Amino acid sequence: MTVLSPAHPAPRLPGEPVRRGTPEYRRIGAALFLTGFSAFSLVYCVQPLLTEFTRAFHVTPAQSALSMSLTTGCLALSILIMSAVADSFSRRRVMLTSLLAAALLNGLAALAPTWTLLLLCRALEGLALGGVPAVAMAYLAEEIHPRDLGAAMGQYVGGTAFGGMMGRVCIGLLSDVTSWHAALLVMAGAGLLSAAGFALLLPPSRGFKPRPAAPAREHLRRWAAHLRTPGLGALFTLGFLNLGVMVAAFNYLGFRLHAPPYALSAAAISLIFLTYLLGSAASGWGGRTADRRGRRPLLTTGLTVSSVGLALTLLPPLPVIIVGITLITVGFFITHAVASSSVGQLARRDKGHASALYLLAYYAGSSVIGVLGGLAWAAGGWPPLVALCAALLGLGLTLTRQIPRG
């Protein structure tokens, strides 16, 4: 008789959630890590190029930031649309199609001869990527055991952190030795390779059952029900504030460090994004710790760490600024890992719709606060930008009181 041990767990029964430590859990984790890596490297790869865009297309810093804001704004809209129709299609097919389309559009953006065409490609890229984030979160909520969901979501968010870092670092280094056109083409190729790895790794879904597309009023009813669920509205707003502050700070960090007295090159500025390595680790730690100690304490910790980091960036020494940026990054990923996993836990049903609302708010925050950050930067540079971000994080800290501790 064979004795099953933790190293050789029993095979999963049909419909049974995946538990941590099983081969399926590891395959799902690796596949979703690649998904997060590809999607977020494509979304954020233009961030180190904003100063390049101002020179190449003769636009202002705020206008160059539209290459980010349009992508995330269209991504927010696409997520809402996809949440209404994705339940009729295979989760795997939706994510794979989105990854392939986004990578190809990033390649077209690299070849765009005018600023208008580049912005159009970036907007379409955001629309294409809408099939990834909401579906990925819903997939994990459907497949992973609730006790292990925080750790699994943390691994996915870790992939987004690694993708965001590699997109920014590789683009900065490549643009210094080649051109921004070649750098964007390389990121498109990396996106295609990640999509291939995802297709090979992700096991078939067992918790998902396709459903016919519901009428629009039914989707409105489901979204309204989530807004009435205690704690979910606060989580949605936290997502809006958390990503918005992160994007606003990093959008204009390059302009600050490129100017005197720092006068850093694009390659040197891109290396600061290596702080995302700590963000990736922090997301996994935040998810696991929230599973044990509760959501609210970890959300408070993440927002507080980001606030301390913001304050440090006001000091002039470059090493202190880098420490501050590191703390902003770590705090952001702790908050996002805990908030995103909490949505799946607090939603009583229709988890895909709940994820869509969270991500709609999340990416809308990137667009809206990214634009507000441009206005603050134009009004007086870095200090007004920090004041805006600090006020928004303070609002986030007050919202954590509305979220259940467990």
Image (tube, rainbow, N blue to C red):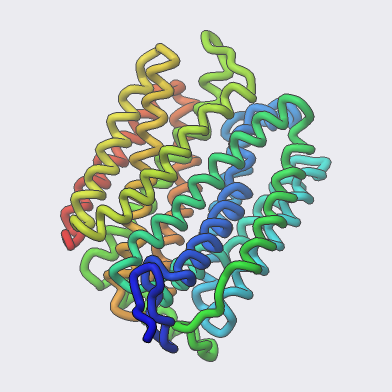
Q: Is residue 45 above or below residue 326?
A: below
Query: Is residue 258 or residue 327 the one in the foreground?
Result: 327
Farthest bottom residue?
212
Quarter holding the C terminus?
A: bottom left
Residue shown at 44%/80% (left/top)? Answer: 219
Residue shown at 37%/28% (left/top)? Answer: 386
Q: Position of residue 346 (x, y in %)?
A: 27, 70
Q: Position of residue 230 (x, y in %)?
A: 21, 68
Position of 294 compared to 60: left or right? Answer: left
Q: Is residue 329 visible?
A: yes
Query: Is residue 6 or residue 349 the one in the foreground?
Result: 6
Query: Is residue 236 or residue 379 the one in the foreground?
Result: 236
Q: Is residue 116 visible?
A: no
Residue shown at 49%/88% (left/top)? Answer: 209
Q: Is residue 118 above or below residue 177?
A: below
Residue shown at 39%/68% (left/top)? Answer: 7
Q: Position of residue 154 (x, y in %)?
A: 39, 55
Q: Position of residue 101 (x, y in %)?
A: 71, 62
Query: Is residue 340 or residue 370 the one in the foreground?
Result: 340
Position of 22 compared to 61: left or right? Answer: left
Quarter holding the N terminus?
A: bottom left
